[in-house]
Image (cartoon, helix red, strand yellow):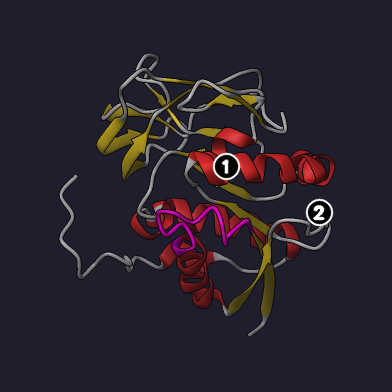
C-alpha cells in the first residue's frame, strides 16, 4: 500500500457498546480505494495518548457505568487530546464519547460527570425518557443527508465555535428542542448515531478519510474516493 494512516480507538474495550469499531472498519474499506492502510491502536485506561502519532481518533459510546470509569481516566489525557483537536486532527466521537469531549454530562442518576472541555457543549439528562428510533439529518454545508439510529437519554447543547453535523428532518437529535444533531468543530465530528454511522453514510466516511489523508499526504491524489460509489449497505435493505 502506498499510504499508511494510524488510528487511535479510545477506550475501545469499554466504549464500544453499539459496535462503534465498525466506523474504523468502514474507514479501512474506503481507504483501499486509494491504496491506503489504517493501523489501529487501542488506547484505554492508564495508556498515554500521543497527539503527534495519530491521523484519526475514534471515541465510541458506552453505558453510564463505563463512562464514569472512563471519565476519570480521560482527565489524564485532557491536554494531548485537546491539542490534537485544536491542531485539526480528524476525530469521530459517538454518543458517550461525544458527550465527554464537552464540559460535563448528567448521568441517569443525576450525578454530574466531568468531560474534558475540549469542545464547548454540555449534556443534561431526561427524566424517565429516552430518544430512540430512526433519525435523518441534512448537513448544511454539503447538502448531504445522513441516516442513523439514536438511543440516548442525554440532551446535548452546543456551544461557542460548534455547529451541528446536521439539521434534524426525522427524529430527535441532540436535545429534541433546537433541531440540531451532532457537532462539527474544526475536524472533529460528533454524533448520537449508532449503527455505526460511517458504515451507513458513505459520503461522511469519505469526507473524514480525505481529511486524514490530506493532512498527512497533501500532494496525494484522492479523486478515486470521489469516484467510488459502492455502498457498504448495498446488500442490506434499510428504510430511513
Per the image, is 46 magenta? no
Q: Position of residue 211 (x, y in %)?
A: 63, 54
Range drawn in magenta: 10-22
Q: Is mark 1 on a helix, strand or loop?
A: helix
Q: Which of 53 and 218 is in front in this view?
A: 53
In the displayed structure, 128 sits above or below 204; it is above
In the displayed structure, 75 sits above or below 211; it is above
Rendered-image quadrant of the C terminus = top left
Figure quadrant of residue 231: bottom left
Q: Nearer the viewer, mark 2 or mark 1?
A: 1
Figure quadrant of residue 83: top right
Figure quadrant of residue 113: top right
Per the rendering, the mark at residue 51 is 2
- Residue at screen point 43% across, 56% down: 198
Rendered-image quadrant of the N terminus = bottom right
- Residue at screen point 71% across, 28% down: 117
Per the rendering, the mark at residue 126 is none
10 Å neighbourhood of mark 1: few (<14), some, or many (≥20)? many
- Residue at screen point 61% across, 18% down: 159
Per the rendering, the mark at residue 67 is 1
Q: Position of residue 180 (x, y in %)?
A: 42, 24
Disc 2 and disc 1 in contact, CB within 8 angstroms: no
Q: Which of 224 and 131 is in front in this view?
A: 131
**Reading the chain from its start, which is encountered first: label 2 or label 1?**
2
Q: Is mark 2 on a helix, strand or loop?
A: loop
- Residue at screen point 83% across, 57% down: 50
User: Left or right: where does residue 195 sit relative to residue 89?
Assistant: left
User: Left or right: where does residue 90 sit relative to residue 105?
Assistant: right
Which residue is situated farthest in the bottom direction here?
Answer: 1
Amino acid at each position: 500500500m502506498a499510504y499508511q494512516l494510524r488510528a487511535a480507538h479510545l477506550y475501545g474495550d469499554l466504549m464500544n457498546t453499539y459496535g462503534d469499531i465498525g466506523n474504523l472498519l468502514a474507514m479501512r474499506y474506503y481507504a483501499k480505494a486509494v491504496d491506503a492502510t489504517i493501523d489501529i491502536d487501542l488506547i484505554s485506561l492508564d495508556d498515554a495518548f500521543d497527539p503527534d502519532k495519530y491521523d484519526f481518533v475514534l471515541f465510541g459510546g458506552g453505558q453510564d457505568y463505563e463512562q464514569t470509569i472512563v471519565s476519570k481516566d480521560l482527565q489524564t489525557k485532557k491536554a494531548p487530546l485537546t491539542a490534537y483537536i485544536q491542531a485539526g486532527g480528524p476525530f469521530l466521537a459517538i454518543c458517550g464519547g461525544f458527550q465527554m469531549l464537552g464540559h460535563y454530562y448528567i448521568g441517569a442518576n443525576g450525578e454530574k460527570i466531568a468531560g474534558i472541555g475540549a469542545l464547548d457543549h454540555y449534556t443534561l439528562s431526561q427524566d424517565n425518557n429516552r430518544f430512540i428510533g430512526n433519525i435523518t439529518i441534512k448537513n448544511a454545508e454539503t447538502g448531504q443527508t445522513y441516516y442513523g439510529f439514536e438511543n440516548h437519554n442525554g440532551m446535548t447543547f452546543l456551544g461557542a465555535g460548534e455547529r451541528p453535523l446536521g439539521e434534524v428532518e426525522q427524529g430527535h437529535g441532540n436535545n429534541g428542542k433546537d433541531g440540531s444533531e451532532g457537532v462539527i468543530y474544526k475536524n472533529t465530528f460528533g454524533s448520537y448515531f449508532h449503527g455505526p454511522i460511517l458504515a451507513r453514510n458513505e459520503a461522511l466516511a469519505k469526507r473524514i478519510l480525505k481529511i486524514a489523508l490530506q493532512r498527512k499526504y497533501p500532494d496525494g491524489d484522492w479523486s478515486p474516493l470521489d469516484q467510488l460509489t459502492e455502498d457498504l449497505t448495498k446488500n442490506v435493505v434499510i428504510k430511513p
